Amino acid sequence: MGKLDGRVAIVTGAAQGIGAAFAKALAFEGSRLVIADLDTGASVVEEIRSAGGVAVDVPTDVSTKDGCENMVSKAIESFGRLDILVNNAAIFTAVERKNFDDIPVDEWDAVMGVNVRGVWLGCCAAVPEMRKNGYGKIISISTGRVFKGTPFFLHYDASKAAVIGITRSLAREVGDDNICVNAIAPGSTMSENVVARTNWKGGNADATMQTRAIKRHEEPEDLVGACVFLASGESDFITGQTLVVDGGSAMW
């Protein structure tokens, strides 16, 4: 018996990297999965199915109301219910380090559109279905950078601080519906896109590693335990919280 047998989960940004790791871990514990991503999630779906799990691929732009409503509709159409939403989709590796006053307005808006509006719209679409069940788990991905005042990614860090604000406020609004709302704050994680950054692999990644109590690189697999815990019944009395998973870099 898995910890999530009978549950249905949506993971956004799950075609690769951290999102794919989340999706595969939730499927391993018995959840049926909707892989929601701008890119095709066919390979992740196939991997889950090959391991005996159940998953569908739903192309999704989380920055749009229609996109978020469609991914929830597909979950209901495919599986009849929705229990878990993991708001993982985000813009990070597509932006470069720059001073706060050099950030183009359109880049600021793009980051906020996915990282903040996407979380809000995902919750707006998912909560009505969770209310029908009298149960739900919403897990949104922030960053440990929020607690450290890291420079040169102000738009990204501001967007991820907003995720924590959404988490706390929404937890107050939906607690009576038996819906738990929490966040995970990773450190710099060696996902495919991060490793591919020529200005990150090596020097920057090694420098980040030295700020940790546990001095090694963080991998997507380091985050899946927190996600499964917050998605499972083991966390039914935890809400409005942010769990930092970064090897002890940010401590607060």
Image (cartoon, rainbow, N blue to C red):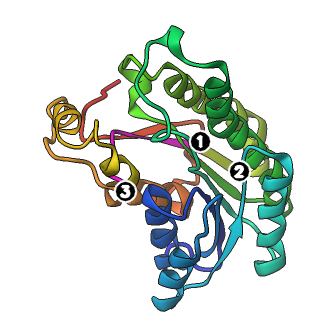
Residue at mark 2:
179
Q: Amino acid at mark 3?
A: Glu
Find numbered disc 2 in the image and state the secondary structure of the residue it sits on. strand
Q: Earlier in the sequence, mark 1 or mark 2?
A: 2
- The disc placed on residue 128 is none
Residue for badge 3: 192
Residue 150 in percent (x, y) is at 36, 20
- C-alpha span from label 1 to label 2: 8 Å
Of pointers 3 and 2, the one earlier in the residue sequence:
2
**Toward the viewer: 68 or 251?**
68
Calculate the distance from the C-alpha at mark 3 to the C-alpha at mark 2. Answer: 32 Å
Contact, mark 1 vs mark 2 (Cβ under 8 Å): yes
User: Which residue is at the front of the view, 94 or 69?
Assistant: 94
How packed is label 3: few (under 14 Cα within 10 Å), some, or many (20 or more)?
few
Disc 1 residue type?
A: Thr
Q: Specify whether residue 133 is in view.
A: no
Residue drawn at the location 59% of the way across and 42% of the way down: 239
Q: Is residue 11 left or right of residue 191?
A: right
